[in-house]
Image: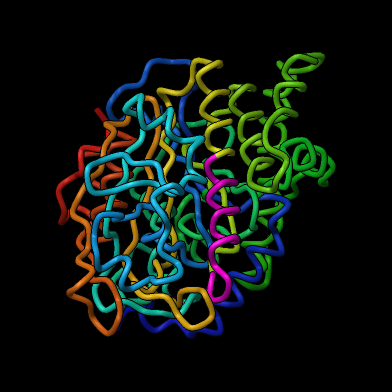
Amino acid sequence: MDAMTKMDPSRRRLLRGLSATLAPFILPCGALIPNLSLAAAPGSWQRMLILVELQGGNDGLNTLVPYRDDAYRALRPTLGLPVDQLVTITGDAALHSALTPLIGTWEAGELAIVQGIGYERPNHSHFRSIEIWDAASGSDEVIPEGWVSRLFAAHHPRSGDADGVIFGRPVLGPLLPTATGDSQAPRRFVVMDSVKNFTRRGLALPANQATTAETPALQHLLTTQAIAGQVAQGVAEDLKKLEGNEALEKRLAAFPQHGFGKQCAELARLLAADSRIAVAKLSLGGFDTHVNQLGTHARLLGELASGLAALRTFAKEQGLWDRLVIASYSEFGRRAGENKSAGTDHGTAAPHFVLGGQIAGGVKGEAPSLTQLQAGDLIHTMPMQRYIGSLAKETWGLTETLPALDRYPPLRLIA
């Protein structure tokens, strides 16, 4: 076994805890993308990938609904959505009506829905399954570094303000670096509650002093603090372009006022400031719908749709919509059948959304069978690694990403 496989689970939890402790600032990495106002070019890192974690396990069957399949109604006698709560998009599938704010994106051909995403030998644990997704690993592998972090170590993005920005839940997920960064150049992954708060705190940090720590872990923490001020300075320079722009402040205040909408507004502020970032991560929690699912799920899908619709409108106004690739993911879907508490339990495969100005819209892949189940679970039809590999290759124009991802052909998500 290699070092990745042998790492003690308790140590992994400690590292994730340290990452959360440092959340107001930054976790290191290499360089970034060029100015977002420039024309995109293959391999130029011009596009920004925006990852949206649906934390808790989103119910795919009540998101993209196989409303004409009799097995759907049989599996969900009370949770099965009536036709008047659906928006038909194909002859066989419909979206939950809470997703109506995204219908304009669908009709414009800028929304792809990738069906049946999952992985071999699925795990029903929240912690373990999201770890598998974050690393884009096999279910029998333990890799203590996110797939984005590993990708950036192999393919250095061009110089800019930060390599990645995390809003919402202060968990790095796919951006998680190793414990100490090892011998790699430090990767700059920034966690922000708000852009202005991060900048103010970062500028207040003491000046960088060359210090050698007694342990690699402490050295990592010192490096993290030292880089935070540097990134804050870059973002502060960007924000100067927005000073006194009252119209912009009113525009950002018009974003939905739920938590996810506010994350979208903060990301929009960075876009307006022309900050140079290769990847951003947003999160929306609450999808662990074991009990009384219908109302909770409708509310969450509504927040997701309204936040992303507001971000799309803003990005189009700024002339940046073609530069964005927004992609959802979740640790798993839900069981095919409802439980006895008017909810659904941890499952496996689920569909996910990809949207942006250059996305080749439509439903991609094959819907899982509702009659051929495995212990009550849907059998995935789309490898998670193919989905992630396609996002990486097509967003950033790469011919190679990571060995585990390059086994699969791209999905042609980008027109």
- Quarter placement of the N terminus: bottom left
Across and down, in percent, residue 358 comes to: 33, 26
Between residue 407 and residue 162, name the one nearer to us.
407
In the rendered structure, the answer to whether residue 239 lies left or right of residue 323 reads right
Across and down, in percent, residue 46 comes to: 40, 27
Residue for point 45% across, 55% down: 184
Above or below, 185 relative to 360: below
Above or below, 183 relative to 45: below
In the rendered structure, the answer to whether residue 250 lies left or right of residue 99 reads right
In the rendered structure, the answer to whether residue 254 lies left or right of residue 319 reads right
Q: Quadrant of residue 390?
A: top left
Across and down, in percent, residue 242 comes to: 73, 18
Secondary structure mostly seen in the magenta stretch: helix
Between residue 291 and residue 330, name the one nearer to us.
291
Across and down, in percent, residue 193 comes to: 72, 47
Between residue 255 and residue 246, name the one nearer to us.
255
Q: Is residue 304 magenta-colored?
A: yes
Residue range of the region highlighted in magenta in the rendering: 289-305
Residue for point 77% across, 35% down: 196
Residue for point 50% across, 60% down: 173
Q: Is residue 338 magenta-colored?
A: no
Rendering colour mode: rainbow
Q: In which quarter of the image is residue 407?
A: bottom left
